[in-house]
Image (cartoon, rainbow, N blue to C red):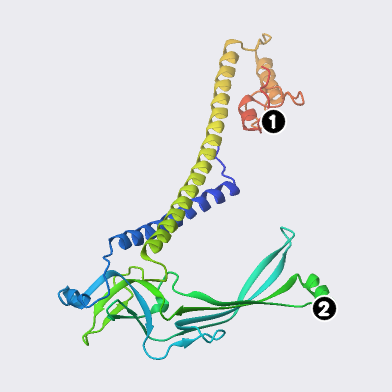
């Protein structure tokens, strides 16, 4: 049987679904591992007893711990660029440009965005407990989670003239305007931190990114909300992995069905060929009795006249129903594109 052809579209769909399911599964496993570590992480109250716990801990270090307290600056805090009464310890100012770009394929305008300016400022800060025990937070910009809130947001819309409108339609781009935002981690905000808790040689408590590769979290939400967000993320990745795997299985089933149908056609042709050979053996063509040298010449002449035009060896024994020609043998007929069965 000839090789089974796989279409380019089928190969692309199968490869994409398998690759996507593998990527989503890896991301799900990573999210699930992070979630398990969060669930197993011990919770500590920020008070004087925390130093005593770390003193008896090997290396004066807890690799993954959860703390919660109020944010206070070490020194002068940052002042909001737009609201002078707001103070913080982290500040992020972002200026983004929004454009409409004409999509010739979908024949619609699509929104496009690019960052024109970004400034991130941080000052040292601590998380304070109920009895003024403080834990210094290190490397806050490396942390995941929502640890800043929006303090300013303003969209500067662009006014167009007639010439601007004509130029936009000719270029395929429309400038909508610029979005200016400011986010800050405010002084006094309640912050949940998950990371490596250490007692320094000078007696200060520090929270830093875990040295074992676990994810570092800072969030202005409580721990239960943070845990729920991670559960939701893991669920999304799991659902995408399952959906991609199902799509890949569907493509494999489709290919298997097509291959089975091709095998059925091949088996049917083999069955017909064997039946044809049997009937030809049972009903040989009658020949007029001719003797001597004339018989040999007649046989050679008849062989040349009735030889299959494809292989030139077997006699012609098939009628092509589409045109009525008798020009080939049954073996060569099987190599032709699919056609109705010949009459014997």
Query: From the viewer's perspective, is residue 336 above or below residue 68?
Result: above
Between residue 117 and residue 253, name the one nearer to us: 117
Between residue 236 and residue 48, name the one nearer to us: 48
* SS label for mark 2: loop
* Mark 2 crowd level (few <14, some 14–19, many ≥20, 10 Å Cα): few
Residue visible at 41% across and 91% down in the picture: 76
Residue visible at 55% across and 84% down in the picture: 83
Q: Position of residue 165 (x, y in %)?
A: 81, 73
Q: Position of residue 302 (x, y in %)?
A: 70, 20
Label ID, residue 309: 1
Q: Is residue 300 left or right of residue 212?
A: right
Circle 2 residue = 161
Question: Quick one: label 2 or label 1, which is nearer the N terminus?
Answer: 2
Q: Is residue 22 visible?
A: no
Give the distance between the C-alpha atoms of the residues marked 2 and 1, in whole angstroms: 77 Å
Q: Is residue 285 visible?
A: yes
Between residue 250 and residue 341, name the one nearer to us: 250
Quarter of the image where the C terminus is located: top right
Q: Is residue 234 left or right of residue 253?
A: left
Residue visible at 32% across and 63% down in the picture: 38
* SS label for mark 1: loop
Residue visible at 36% across and 88% down in the picture: 74
């Amino acid at each position: 049987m000839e090789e089974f052809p796989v279409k380019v579209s089928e190969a692309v769909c199968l490869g994409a679904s398998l690759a996507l399911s593998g990527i989503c599964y890896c991301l799900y496993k990573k999210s699930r591992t992070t979630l398990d570590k969060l669930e197993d992480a011990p919770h500590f109250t920020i008070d004087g007893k925390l130093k005593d716990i770390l003193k008896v801990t090997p290396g004066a270090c807890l690799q993954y711990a959860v703390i919660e307290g109020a944010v206070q600056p070490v020194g002068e805090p940052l002042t909001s660029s737009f609201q002078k009464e707001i103070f913080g310890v982290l500040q992020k100012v972002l200026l983004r440009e929004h454009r409409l770009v004409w999509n010739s394929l979908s024949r619609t305008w699509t929104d496009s965005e690019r960052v024109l300016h970004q400034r991130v400022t941080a000052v040292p800060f601590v998380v304070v407990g109920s009895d003024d025990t403080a834990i210094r937070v290190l490397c806050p910009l490396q942390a995941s989670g929502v640890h800043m809130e929006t303090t300013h947001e303003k969209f500067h819309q662009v006014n167009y003239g007639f010439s601007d409108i004509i130029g936009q339609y000719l270029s395929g781009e429309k400038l909508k305007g610029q979005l200016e935002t400011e986010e800050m981690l405010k002084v006094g905000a309640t912050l949940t931190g998950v990371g490596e808790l250490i007692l320094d040689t000078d007696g200060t408590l520090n929270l830093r990114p875990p040295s074992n590769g676990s994810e570092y979290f800072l969030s202005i939400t409580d721990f239960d909300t943070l845990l729920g967000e991670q559960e939701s993320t893991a669920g999304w990745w799991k659902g995408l992995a399952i959906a991609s795997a199902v799509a890949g299985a569907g493509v494999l089933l489709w290919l298997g069905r097509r291959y089975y149908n091709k095998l059925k056609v091949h088996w049917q042709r083999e069955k017909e060929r064997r039946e044809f050979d049997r009937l030809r053996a049972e009903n040989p063509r009658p020949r007029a009795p001719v003797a001597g040298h004339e018989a040999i010449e007649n046989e050679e002449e008849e062989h040349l006249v009735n030889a299959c035009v494809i292989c030139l060896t077997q006699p012609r024994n098939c009628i092509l129903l589409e045109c009525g020609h008798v020009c080939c043998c049954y073996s060569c007929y099987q190599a032709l594109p699919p056609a109705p069965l010949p009459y014997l």
